[in-house]
Amino acid sequence: MDKSQLINDFATLAIQSGGWMEMDRVYLQNQLADLLHETAFNRETLVKNIPSEASVLIEELVKVACSNGAMTSSESLENYKTKLLDFLTPPPAVINAMFSQHFNDDPQVALDYFYNICLQNQQVRVPKTTRTENLTVPYPLNVKKIAMSSITDVPFVEGHRYCPVCSANEGYINREQQVFDRNMRLIRMNLLGDSWFFRFNPISFQRQQGIFIPEKHEHLNRRQLLSRAIQLVDVFSSYMIGFIDNAHTALEHSYLEGANQLFPIESAKNINLFDIIIFPTVKGRLLNWNHSSVSLTSAQPMDLLNAVDYFISKWISENNRDTPIAVAMRKNADLYTCYIIFMDYRLYETIGMIKQGFNQTINCFDALGTYTLDDEADSTTIIDVENPNHISTGILETFIKTL
């Protein structure tokens, strides 16, 4: 492609991203030409056309930069690419204003707007799925295999200003540690008077997978996280939002994770129904699931919060078990449902199981029935996913009778 046309097409994408206006085109052309060390820019040969995808144009621009000696000997390719991609990323104030405007009309339009920007500027990667299995017996599980080669260039590094999730990383660059968050953007929100942020996960294993982060760098206890999760599903009503409750893996900077989709556990059959005497507005279900699991539902969010906190605290005090507990919140119409899943360690010892959380940590998605495997995992991995943990389920059933 002609170099001048390449620069102009990239300027068109930048304008379409919403961070620039048509009157900025000449400015963008000049800035890009300077970054590329391209002196032979010819406006007379330009034609109006539909630009190629950003990833294609970026690769072509990098070739021009290399041939022109635009990258210094100490500059990494990743850093240079983020300089180009920054043209496609509106400033934080613009993105937040546009997100808020769209959200007032249609929350899904707002999420799509932000997600598409993050895809285009490569802040979010979607792994290539090589195979999907929807298991229906005995549990409605979703198991997919992905090509790890499609996400090997997503960095998981130390060297952030405080920690990987802190809001101080928005636009942060640490060349020594190879941290280039120049194009990372956060959506601001207020929860119970506290400042929180929303961003998409760097690898989107599930649909529009996101993380919800308090501005303060601090650990939040179970009750605090439950309270925020309830508030968040009021706002992000299409999301399942949750966390892993385990005192032995307490995060210094707590956050919640979620995805914009239904999860298989929502179709799980009941083993039996139960009540919690001191919380009459809350209805419980013991689920037929491959982890020992219950769901608690109520139209009263504060009653549900208290019931979930009581249930987990009582379980831990009486059973002295330190296995991870996945907690996930969903809102349907006027009903809030919280899924409590006592996770089985054997699944994380299975070869080929991929951790889907932020920075490749475990999160609640596996427990909710969506498993992601390396594309080289064999069939025994699938069998391990299907096998239930009957011992824990029996203990849980006995425990419920004491409520």
Image (cartoon, rainbow, N blue to C red):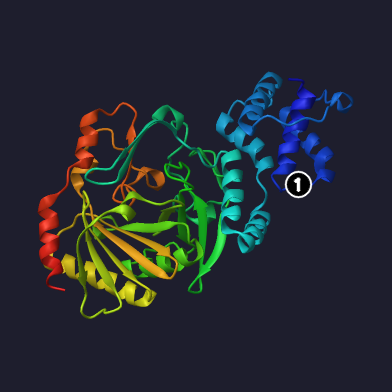
238 vs 380, left or right, is right
Percent coordinates x, y for residue 271 in the rendering: 18, 59
Front residue of 190 and 280: 280
- Decide: few, some or many residues near mark 1? Use Cα within 10 Å; few <14, some 14-19, many ≥20: many
Whether residue 320 is visible: no
State the residue at coordinates (79%, 25%): 4
Percent coordinates x, y for residue 166 in the rendering: 48, 55
Front residue of 99 and 275: 275
Residue type at numbered disc 1:
Trp
Q: Secondary structure at mark 1?
A: loop
Residue 54's quadrant in the figure? top right
Percent coordinates x, y for residue 62 in the rendering: 64, 26
Reading the image, the residue beneath label 1 is 20
Image quarter in which the C terminus is found? bottom left
Front residue of 227 and 378: 378
87 vs 368, left or right, is right
Image quarter in which the N terminus is found? top right
Percent coordinates x, y for residue 263 in the rendering: 36, 51
Residue most toward the right?
Answer: 44
189 vs 58, left or right, is left
Whether residue 388 is visible: yes
Q: Can you say whether 175 is above or below 326 in the image? A: above
Q: Can you say whether 64 is above or below 155 in the image? A: above
State the residue at coordinates (61%, 37%): 82
344 vs 160, left or right, is left
Residue 110's quadrant in the figure? bottom right
Q: Can you say whether 369 is above or below 66 in the image? A: below
